Image (cartoon, rainbow, N blue to C red):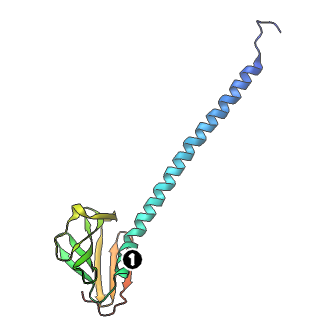
Amino acid sequence: MKQGEKNPIGFYTIGIVALFLAGFFLLVVFGARSYRGTVASQNGNMDHRALLAYPATAVKANDIRGAVEVRESEKGQVLVIADGDSGYALRVYRHEGKLVEDYSAIDAPLQPSEAQTIAETKEFSVERPRGDLLVVHTDAGRAVICLRSEGSDG
């Protein structure tokens, strides 16, 4: 071969390598976007379920006579779940568009700055249609909770 001639095989090789690299980078970019969308959807689903499941689970875990009550406060309705005879309670309420919980003395003032966020919600209300039934309404829908301790006060 003469030195003045160019070898086209080298250009083809570089072109094929560049094509594979471009395909690889596109695959990584689209895969990352797809993964981000999947994770965002999963987090939204978990928040949605937490809005209903958390209050129901908290009530069921502490379901003893007189432990569950609904109070009115400056923040709106507060679901108060007493922790036995300790004088402390788990209090679930809405603050600044979020469903929050705090654990402190039953009659202590609410402390939203110390509260743990459960999930975002624009609505939180609790009904007590009869003594052994509790209905919690949030953005995710409603949870109907039947109290096992039949004559709970509230």
Which quadrant, please, contains the N terminus?
A: top right
Which quadrant, please, contains the C terminus?
A: bottom left
Point out residue 119 in the picture as x, y percentages from the top left corner: 35, 64
Q: Secondary structure at mark 1?
A: helix
Residue 11 placement: quadrant: top right
Work out whether residue 86 or residue 99 is closer to the camera in this orientation and state it: 86
Residue 68 placement: quadrant: bottom left
Q: In this rendering, does residue 120 appear at all?
A: no
71 shown above or below 23: below
Q: Say which amino acid is labelled 1.
A: Thr
Residue at position x 69%, y 24% in the image: 14
Crowding at dot 1, Cα within 10 Å, few <14 / some 14-19 / many 20+, comes out as few
16 shown above or below 121: above
Looking at the image, residue 67 sits to the left or right of residue 9; the answer is left
43 shown above or below 19: below
Q: In this rendering, does residue 3 appear at all?
A: yes
